[in-house]
Image (cartoon, helix red, strand yellow):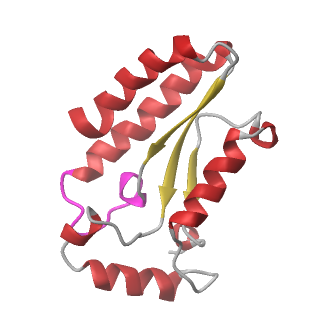
């Protein structure tokens, strides 16, 4: 909880005074914050707390023209994810369930974050943005 949630809050409060012209902050979440994902273990409530923290920071910092988002990508092949039990099965399931029929990659996450940081996303804040090829909309 300290590493994944509280540290983001502390960093946001330290960064906000430096963002004199406003800006955008991002935290990385995962679908397991909203829905049950087997083998996601203790990270489930931690990511849920992180998403709530993003909403409250968006409220607190909005008057300073600072927007805050949680980005929730689909399964990505990362070092942290490799420690999850049955991660390969999770990847295969994401491809099968995705309306676009493909896994997302870090470039997709970067494109979404870049969009949200531009004036095109100027009225968006406090949201959890899913970048998962539509997996999160599937039953």
Residue at the spot x=41%, y=84% of the render? 93
In the depicted structure, whether residue 70 falls above or below residue 2: below
Query: Which span is picked out in magenta?
Result: 31-42
- Of residue 31 and residue 114, the one placed in the foreground of this image is 114
Q: Position of residue 72 (x, y in %)?
A: 49, 55
Name which quarter of the figure residue 81 lies in. bottom left
User: In the shown orientation, is residue 60 left or right of residue 119?
Assistant: left
Extreme-front residue of the structure: 18
The number of callouts visible is: 0
User: In the shown orientation, is residue 42 left or right of residue 103?
Assistant: left
* Residue 131 appears in the figure: no
Confirm whether the magenta stretch covers residue 121. no
Q: Position of residue 129 (x, y in %)?
A: 58, 51
Q: Position of residue 28 (x, y in %)?
A: 43, 48
User: Magenta region, mostly helix, strand or loop?
Assistant: loop
Confirm whether the magenta stretch covers residue 37. yes
User: In the shown orientation, is residue 23 left or right of residue 118?
Assistant: left
């Amino acid at each position: 909880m300290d590493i994944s949630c509280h540290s983001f809050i502390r960093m946001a409060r330290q960064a906000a005074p430096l963002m004199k012209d406003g800006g955008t902050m991002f935290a990385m979440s995962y679908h397991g914050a909203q829905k049950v994902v087997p083998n996601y273990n203790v990270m489930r409530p931690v990511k849920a707390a992180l998403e709530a923290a993003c909403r409250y920071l968006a409220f607190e910092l909005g008057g300073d023209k600072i927007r805050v988002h949680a980005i929730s990508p689909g399964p990505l092949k990362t070092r942290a994810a490799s420690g999850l039990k049955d991660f390969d099965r999770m990847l295969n399931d994401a491809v099968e369930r995705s309306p676009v029929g493909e896994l997302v990659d870090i470039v997709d996450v970067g494109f979404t974050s870049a969009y949200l940081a531009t004036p095109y996303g100027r009225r968006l804040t406090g949201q959890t943005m899913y970048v998962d090829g539509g997996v999160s909309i599937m039953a």
